[in-house]
Image (cartoon, rainbow, N blue to C red):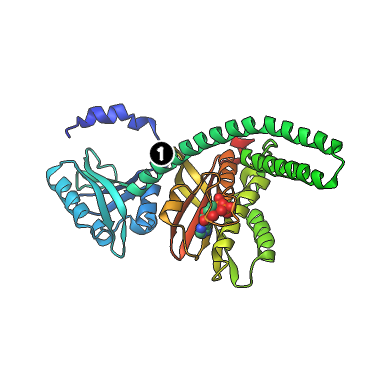
Amino acid sequence: MHRDSTKSQRSRGIHAYTSAQLQSLLDNISTALIEVNQNGLILFINNAAEMVLKTSAHQLVGTLISDLVRDAALLAAINEVTQQGNLVSKRGVMLELNHTVLEPVNFNVSPIEGSANHGDTAGCCTLIEIVPIEQQLRMSREEEMVAQQYATRALVRGLAHEIQNPLGGLRGAAQLLERELKEAELREYTQIIIAEADRLKALIDRMLGPKRSQQPQWTNLHEVLERVRQVIGAGADATITLQRDYDPSIPEIFVDKDQLIQAVMNLVKNAVQALEDQGGTIILKSRAVRHHSIGSRMHRLVAQIEVIDNGPGIDEVMGKNLFLPMVTGREQGSGLGLPIAQSLINLNQGIIEWSSRPGETKFTICIPISERQESR
Ligand SMILES: Nc1ncnc2c1ncn2[C@@H]1O[C@H](COP(=O)(O)OP(=O)(O)O)[C@@H](O)[C@H]1O
Ligand SMILES: [Mg+2]
């Protein structure tokens, strides 16, 4: 790619930004950016790159890229760009760092023209852009899940309303009939009709989700988690251990606290049920993560609550329909715990993600952390 450097500098409006503004702009980009000079010395890395490389800018700036990255494809690309000034793009590369193989990524390596403003005299610098593919896959998977849930909820709502009216009539008629019946034996039948109608009504109410309007408030995540721990801990088997792994620095989040408690409760209950036969450990974990997407929206800061158990896991068939109502793997199950939890979290602008293999099942509630003045 050939660029006219003076023209591109002008159109980028470099002079309009202070360096602090530029730094903040680069730190808010979700693509990992690394700038190296002609000798392969790292000059700059943004926040997203710190996350991908799992090391801080402080530790990396001034070191050689070849000391950090072992990946032959990436090192060859950097070499080619430095030598020939081409742009090199590669897709689906397993990024290999010195100590670990990281997730698959796409990367672009390109020359930055006119980049001597780091006090670096070596001339043309190189920009490395890295996008973890997992993030893109996750974004499209979540979009699909949100669309599927939207359709399911519409279907359930429509069906529930269709059932509700005749059900009311049916129950009323059974009551009238009961009054007319003299024999207690016959009244048993009307009692059954009434009881079953009530059961169906309760089921429909649960499927329709929360009735009351939302009451968001500034909420401390750990109060939520502690409440769940107390309630579940009291009733759980002695063979099940509940562990805490909290990040104490998470800011408060603006959510409907009761809805969040209910959602976490549903996840922990499932974990307890998964461990009921053989016992095991459930970990309640909280973290704040930067630059995380929820559905198709990127957020600067996201609170995560993870419920992790070391039970048997969720098999593939169940996994495909996990959040659909009435899908259950248990004899006594209603199949409503997860769809209700998901819709409660969706109401609070969040999403529930999950992953599972035998020995580790993880449900993660992600909710954006907004700045206080924005939400008030
Ligand atoms: N932590 C878990 N480990 C194993 N299976 C799980 C876990 N969480 C959920 N499941 C599976 O998902 C199904 C649906 O869960 P849910 O929607 O809460 O309904 P229910 O608990 O009434 O079956 C469960 O029946 C179970 O098979
Ligand atoms: Mg359940």
Q: Quadrant of residue 3?
A: top left
Residue under label 1, please give it: 25
Residue 38, percent across and down? 19, 50
Q: Residues within 10 Å of mark 1 (few under 14, many from 20)?
A: few
Q: Residue at x 39, y 56 (%)?
A: 56
Q: Nearer the viewer, residue 331 or 125?
A: 331
Image quadrant holding the C terminus, namely: top right
Using the rendered view, name the quadrant where residue 228 is placed.
bottom right
Which is nearer the eye, 115 or 158?
Answer: 158
Q: Tell me if the residue at label 1 has its CB under 8 Å from ligand 1.
A: no
Q: Is residue 99 visible?
A: yes
Q: Residue at x 65, y 48 (%)?
A: 219
Q: Secondary structure at mark 1?
A: helix
Residue lying at 73% horizontally and 31% vertically, measured from the top left? 169
Q: Which residue, as the protein is rendered here, is positioned at the far left?
A: 84
| Nearer to us in this view, 251 or 333 | 333
Rendered view: 104 above or below 205: below
Q: Position of residue 30 (x, y in %)?
A: 39, 43
